[in-house]
């Protein structure tokens, strides 16, 4: 519950072992001029289903979800966000970055719902997927339910592969293919990582470097 | 009587009968080239003649397959080495089209490759003054150190970033693949100056300069000029060859 004019940032980085089902509900109710920020990083577990949500009930309330999903091998990261705009002039932003490797699967599942009561609401969704090899996959399921004509909604999505050319460029400077791939992946998630507290950011970069060892042929 | 000791030095780089293909298309056929340490070679030729393919092959690009011939660098067979092994042996390729790596901090990347080259871990505080000196030489503003590698850089800025990487690595063989294309006169002078600085600091450095234009060759004077046509080196000569090409084109350069 984010009261009038308050700001809450909730940061989670999870790296569960491979036999854990990680099914989580996260909801925030945001009142007038309140700010709710969910920062969410999901690495391990057998399957994760997690969609932090913000109910923007007060005028000018703001909700944000920054999420990173990293699916390595037999993992399925099904992550996303829900933004429910109820009051006028509410704004929201969802930025989702996912990486799938060695047969991993990532899904972005998101909902932006703008109710008739939410006049002049603005919502922005950006989801970027990086797929590292031909065994891995990524899906996007964005749902936009817009019931108010004054709403401004943006949705951007990109899918990229780990380019052979980029790897060659970096390795030609004297670093290994694994190191180069790690730099490209860490660069991909950097816009979110830079928002993290330093210890978390270092931990996340290390985990990805570790997972890269011996992974690129 | 004093007899001069005869020392037979193998060239730094020796390319013999090299044939290269890309996706079943033969691009280079029987290329021969010797580069002695400390020399400057210019490689000229029309578009599509195979100059960039040769540069990329030397650096170990996976886009090309060597079908015949050999490349020996400092006595080692280059063809069995990975791109990073070649870089660590002292080969540097300045890319014609440098790639953008979003999110990769320039300063930390340069420190990483510097550490690999010198074989020890240089702490960020120790690396900072080294980097600042090299950035001054490459005429780059200090804020570039905190940007992402080539991300959103202009064409000229990307070329300066290549030159900065060259200054950080101080390689033994510098391959400049059309470093002069799309540059204004001032930027060209800055880049030439940085290359000449490296040559003065490390006189044994060899340079292979790939270009279409004589302009850069007035600033970095070649000892030898080679003309490549249809995947083979057809003519080699001294710098006077540049003027022949300037006046009568590649076809009459023989």
Image (cartoon, grey):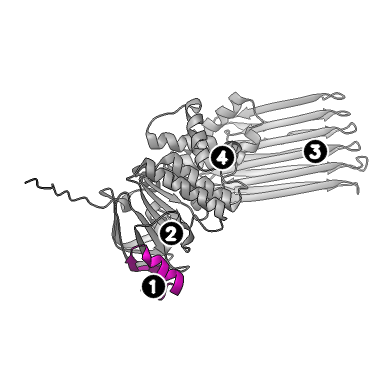
Would you say residue B117 is visible in this rendering?
yes
Q: Are marks 1 and 2 in contact (CB under 8 Å)?
A: no
Residue neighbourhood size for the residue with mark 3, other residues' Cα within 10 Å, grouped as few (<14), some (14–19), many (≥20)? many
Write the start and end of the magenta stretch as one range.
B228-254
Given this view, does label 4 or label 1 mark the residue nearer the observer? 1
Magenta segment: does it hold B245?
A: yes
Residue neighbourhood size for the residue with mark 4, other residues' Cα within 10 Å, grouped as few (<14), some (14–19), many (≥20)? many
Given this view, does label 4 or label 2 mark the residue nearer the observer? 2
Chain of the residue under the numbered disc 1 shown in the image = B
Q: Please report the residue visible at 85 percent of the width from the left and 23 percent of the height from the top.
A: A3
Q: CA distance from mark 4 to mark 2?
A: 28 Å
User: In the image, is B3 to the left or to the right of B150?
Assistant: left
Q: Are marks 1 and 2 on the same chain?
A: yes
Q: CA distance from mark 4 to mark 1?
A: 45 Å
Would you say residue A134 is visible in this rendering?
no
Q: Please report the residue visible at 31 percent of the width from the left and 51 percent of the height from the top.
A: B78
Residue neighbourhood size for the residue with mark 1, other residues' Cα within 10 Å, grouped as few (<14), some (14–19), many (≥20)? some
Q: Which residue is mark 1?
A: B253
Chain of the residue under the numbered disc 3 shown in the image = A
**Numbered mark located on residue B104 in the image:** 4
Q: CA distance from mark 2 to mark 3?
A: 51 Å
Q: Is residue A153 above or below residue B107?
A: below
């Amino acid at each position: 519950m984010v009261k009038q004019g308050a700001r809450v940032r909730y940061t989670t980085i999870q790296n569960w072992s491979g036999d854990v089902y990680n099914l989580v509900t996260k909801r925030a109710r945001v009142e007038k001029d309140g700010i709710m920020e969910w920062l969410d990083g999901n690495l391990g577990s057998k399957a994760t289903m997690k969609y932090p949500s913000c109910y923007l009930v007060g005028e000018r309330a703001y909700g944000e979800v920054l999420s990173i999903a990293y699916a390595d091998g037999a993992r399925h990261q099904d992550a996303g966000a829900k933004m429910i705009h109820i009051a006028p002039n509410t704004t929201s932003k969802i930025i989702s970055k996912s990486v799938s490797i060695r047969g991993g699967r990532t899904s972005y599942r998101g909902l932006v719902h703008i109710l008739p009561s939410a006049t002049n609401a603005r919502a922005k969704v950006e989801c970027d997927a990086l797929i590292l090899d031909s065994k891995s996959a990524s899906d996007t399921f964005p749902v936009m339910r817009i019931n108010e004509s004054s709403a401004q909604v943006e949705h951007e999505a990109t899918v990229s592969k780990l380019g052979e050319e980029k790897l060659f460029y970096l390795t030609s400077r004297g670093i290994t293919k694994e190191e180069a791939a790690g730099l490209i992946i860490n660069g991909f998630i950097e816009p979110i990582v830079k928002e993290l507290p330093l210890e978390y950011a270092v931990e996340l970069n290390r985990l990805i470097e570790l997972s890269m060892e011996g992974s690129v042929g | 009587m004093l007899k001069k000791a005869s020392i037979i030095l193998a060239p730094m780089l020796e390319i013999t009968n090299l044939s290269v293909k890309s996706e079943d298309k033969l691009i280079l056929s029987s290329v021969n080239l010797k580069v002695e340490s400390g020399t400057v070679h210019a490689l000229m030729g029309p578009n599509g003649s195979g100059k960039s393919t040769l540069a990329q092959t030397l650096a170990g690009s996976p886009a090309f397959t060597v079908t015949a011939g050999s490349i020996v660098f400092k006595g080692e067979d280059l063809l069995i080495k990975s791109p990073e092994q070649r870089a660590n042996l002292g080969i540097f390729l300045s890319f014609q089209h440098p790639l953008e790596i979003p999110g990769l901090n320039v300063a930390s990347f340069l420190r990483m490759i510097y550490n690999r080259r010198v074989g020890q871990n240089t702490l960020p505080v120790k690396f900072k003054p080294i980097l600042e000196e090299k950035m001054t030489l490459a005429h780059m503003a200090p804020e570039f150190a905190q940007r992402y590698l080539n991300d959103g850089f202009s064409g000229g800025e990307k070329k300066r970033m290549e030159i900065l990487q060259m200054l950080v690595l101080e390689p033994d063989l510098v391959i400049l693949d059309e470093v002069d294309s799309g540059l204004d006169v001032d930027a060209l002078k800055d880049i030439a100056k940085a290359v000449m600085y490296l040559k003065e600091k490390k006189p044994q450095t060899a340079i292979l300069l790939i270009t279409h234009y004589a302009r850069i060759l007035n600033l970095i004077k070649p000892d030898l000029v080679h003309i490549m046509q249809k995947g083979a080196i057809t003519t080699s000569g001294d710098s006077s060859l540049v003027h022949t090409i300037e006046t009568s084109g590649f076809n009459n350069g023989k």
